Structure formats: C-alpha cells, structure tokens
Amino acid sequence: MAGNPERRAALVDAGVEVLAREGARGLTFRAVDSAAAVPVGTASNYFTGRDDLLRQIDSRLRVRLAPDPEVLGALLARPRDRSLVTALMHDLTARATGDRSGYLALLELRLEATRRPELRASFTSSVRGDLEYGMDFHREAGLPGGDETVVVLYLAMLGLLMEHLTLPDVLDGVLPGVGVPEGLVERIVATVLPHDAQAPT
C-alpha cells in the first residue's frame, strides 16, 4: 500500500464527506477519488478494502470531533458545578454542528455497523471506549453527578444532535421560547443534573 500520510489523510477526509453525503452505499473508492480530486485508482492504493477505509474514517472522526485542548483547558479553569457541565455540553454541540459532515458520517457508521458484524465489534469497542472515557473524565474532573449522569447525558445529547443535524424541523418550536439546540442543551442538563447534585466522594 502507498505510504504518503498526507495523501492518506486527505483520502480519509474525502471518505468522510462521501459517507455523510451519499451514505454507506455510496462510499466507493471511485467516489473517494473524485471527492479528493485525485486520479481514479488512488484510494485503492491506500486501503486494503472498504472495511479498512471505514475503520480509518472512524479513527479520523475521533480526532475531528475531539475537544480542542485550549478550549477544554479554559473550561476546566471554572468551578466544578452544573454550569461547567452545561458549558461542556455546549462545546460538544458546537463541535458536532461545526463539523456536520463528520457527525453525519459517524451516524452512517452506526447504521453500517448494524448490517456488518465484522464492523460492529470494532465500532462498538470505539464508541464504548468514548463513553467510558467520558465517565472517567467526569469523575476525575470532580464534576457533579456520577457515571449515571454521564450515561444519561450521553443518551440525551446523542438524541438531540441526531435530530438537530438530520431533521431540525422536528425540534423547531416544539418547546416555545426554547432555542434549538442551545436552549435544549440547557434544559437537558437542568433535568439530568439538579442544582443540588454533588460530585461523588
């Protein structure tokens, strides 16, 4: 396989765009070559097959959608209270909406994993790893609530982002006076994490 890391990264990013736009059925090497504006046959020199490309897209999305260390550092300088949890959820929302193609591609990977057992194990492992990292982060940062808080926030935010990025009109005006998605983020955290919630000791 070809070993140019910059070209490989560009092809993987092109794969993200194709996956978000066309879905898993449209993710072909030819489509990736076209999206990356490279000669036909280039992608086939960089990936052993379609599953290899999907796994590399998964890995790339972990980087693209990860928190900015400087932003995270500034947030963690704040008091460890519910407002910080809310700010972290706003940051998550901003990252997902700022890289809509990346988040849609992540949703497409979920769907593809339901059809392909060989991908399901790999993708389940990476998503479960993200969730466990979130629980560890929450605990070690001394944030209010515990593992259950993180799991419920994870599920609520997943639903909010999926709806907002795929069928935004579903949420538009559903709660009068509550902005989408920012106001709903506030309501989610307030519901999951009451004011008097404390960090576990």
Image: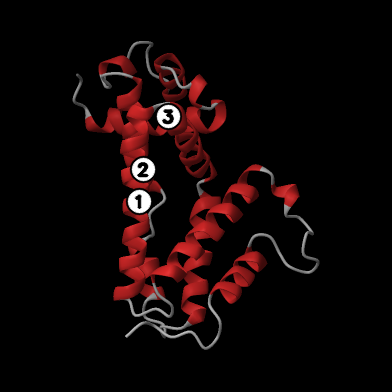
Q: Nearer the viewer, mark 2 or mark 3?
A: 2
Disc 1: CA contacts within 10 A as few (<14), some (14-19) or many (>=20): few
Where does the image place residue 76, in percent across and percent down from the top left?
37, 76
Kind of residue sitting beneath label 1: Arg
Q: Is residue 6 above or below residue 64?
A: above
Mark 1, residue position:
128
Spatial distance from mark 2 to mark 3, Cα to Cα?
23 Å
Relative horizontal placement of residue 103, taking residue 142 as reference (left or right): right
Residue at 43 percent of width and 77 percent of height: 145
Query: Along the line of sight, which residue is nearer the eye, 64 or 125?
Result: 125
Q: How many marks?
A: 3
Disc 3: CA contacts within 10 A as few (<14), some (14-19) or many (>=20): many
Mark 2, residue position:
124
Quadrant placement of the C terminus: bottom left
Disc with the residue nearer the chain's start (2 vs 3): 3
Is residue 91 visible in the rendered image? The answer is: no
Mark 3, residue position:
14
Residue at 31 percent of width and 37 percent of height: 122
Residue at 45 percent of width and 35 percent of height: 109
Q: Is residue 36 above or below residue 198?
A: above
Do tag 2 and tag 3 residues touch (Cβ < 8 Å)? no
Query: Along the line of sight, which residue is nearer the eye, 7 or 103?
Result: 103
Do tag 1 and tag 3 residues touch (Cβ < 8 Å)? no
Where does the image place residue 183, in percent across and percent down from the top left?
66, 68
Is residue 131 visible in the rendered image? The answer is: yes
Q: Nearer the viewer, mark 1 or mark 3?
A: 1
Do tag 1 and tag 2 residues touch (Cβ < 8 Å)? yes
Where does the image place residue 177, in percent across and percent down from the top left?
78, 69
Residue at 52 percent of width and 73 percent of height: 86
Relative horizontal placement of residue 3, taking residue 104 as reference (left or right): left
